[in-house]
Image (tube, helix red, strand yellow):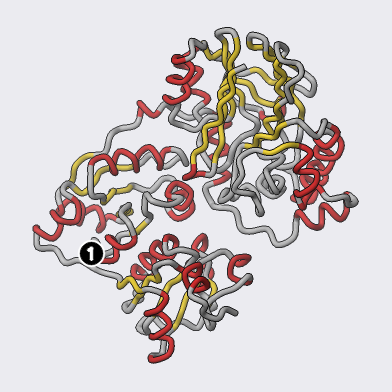
Amino acid sequence: MFFKQFYLACLAHASYLIGSDGEAVVVDPQRDVDEYLAEASAHGFQIKYVIETHLHADFVSGHQEIAARTGAQIVFGEKAAAEFAHRAVRDGEEIKIGKVVLRFIETPGHTPEGICILVTDTESPDQPQKLLTGDTLFIGDVGRPDLAGGKGYTPQMMAEMMYESLHGKLLKLPDDVEVYPAHGAGSMCGRNMSKETSSTIGEQRKFNYALKPMSKEEFVTMMTADLPEAPVYFPKDAEINRSGARGLYELQPPAPLTPQQVLESRQRGDVLLDVRSAADFGAAHVPGSMNIGLGGQFAMWAGSLIPLSAAIVVIADTGAQVDESVVRLARVGIENVKGYLDGGIQSWREAGFPVDSIEQVSVEQLKEKMDDNELQIVDVRRPAEYVNGHVPGAFNAPLANLDKSLGPLPLKRDKLTAVICAGGYRSSAAASLLQQQGFSNLLNVSGGTGAWINAGYPVE
């Protein structure tokens, strides 16, 4: 058996290619599918099936494009109600590719239609089986029960289903079965995921907090308490996956725009998306632009902060960054990149248009300013991160819903304001949004709370 995991760090997303005797299957593919086709071709595999463990909410899947380009059959759990030709599988059904058997296990809980796939190599019966768990069982966590909202299920109902899926099915498998989930640390589909991308049933039985012996009632209470707010694009992406996304090749490439055209775009209300690093953005940027750097979880934050229907103008240093931005935005269903600033920020300055800046400060400089000046500090991490330790006196205004969280805080727009997160990435995005809202004296803290703690400074 050929088995390969593809891990996309930007979305903390894992997908898989399994092959045997000239046949292959792709499981939970990302939207841009060329690497699966290239890998299959390199090993002489014909892709026969593309399987989705559930309707993904955090990214747009490439199942339609793989099927169109290879003739593969799309497979979903029967409760997915996908709106295109597919095979709907039930508990216990199997398919074969070469000498490999894939058996489907219905595991509702994260979503109603969730399935896991038990993979057996009949040619090597002594080898441990592999279990592709989708978003049912993660390494160190299990899937959130609250992302199927609006479909007639409460989080409590989904958590009850998850308990039965875990204890009634997955935990009855042998300890040596290898576990391969669809997401890892950083994904919003769980709360406590490990940085590891595979494990075993036995290891998870020992170390996964959600698999500790407990009653169903205790499990439901635990899984439905203090859930972080889901990104707004999740329900929309799930519906795109249900109806089937168009191929990336169908997207219109963005047009090169002059500074004057970018100015007109801004006046129309288009989103000016600067994808450069926090340092470069801070040094000089187009007034009114938003900073989401390509160096971090770009797609997730773009999906969280930019409406899927918004018209977008990209500001980047190179054409390659523009192209990368288009693909990574499309991965979360943002397809409306109208253009890019030709020549980047340099052309904007050469045209004589003014630039804005945001000062970047180290934690040492932040400490000095806290000692010497009146300063307000905004921590834009998630509430769970904030309560585990933050810079003294910092207000918590999570980036994911910055507008809402700022409302009740006693912040003054003309006061010196330091913005901090874990490492400086989210805080740069937040600072760009605060600047749009009229905050006129901003600092972005490079290195973030991690650097603050490492420097030995006190936390609350």
Quadrant location of the C terminus in the rendered image: bottom right
Q: Amino acid at mark 1?
A: Ala
Residue at 63% across / 49% down in the picture?
194
Residue at 35% across / 26% down in the picture?
249
Return the x and y of residue 230 as percentages of the image width and height: 59, 53
Q: Choose top left, top right, bottom left or bottom right for residue 446.
A: bottom left
Q: Residues within 10 Å of mark 1 (few under 14, many from 20)?
A: some
User: What residue did someone put label 1 on?
Assistant: 284
SS for callout 1:
loop
Note whether residue 73 is visible: no
Q: Choose top left, top right, bottom left or bottom right for residue 280.
A: bottom left
Q: Choose top left, top right, bottom left or bottom right for residue 175.
A: top right
Return the x and y of residue 326 as percentages of the image width and height: 34, 40
Q: Is residue 315 above or below residue 98?
A: below
- Considering depth in this image, is 1 or 322 the residue closer to the camera? 1
Return the x and y of residue 137 as percentages of the image width and height: 71, 40
Farthest right residue?
A: 215
- Considering depth in this image, is 181 or 158 the residue closer to the camera? 181
Return the x and y of residue 114 as percentages of the image width and height: 70, 34
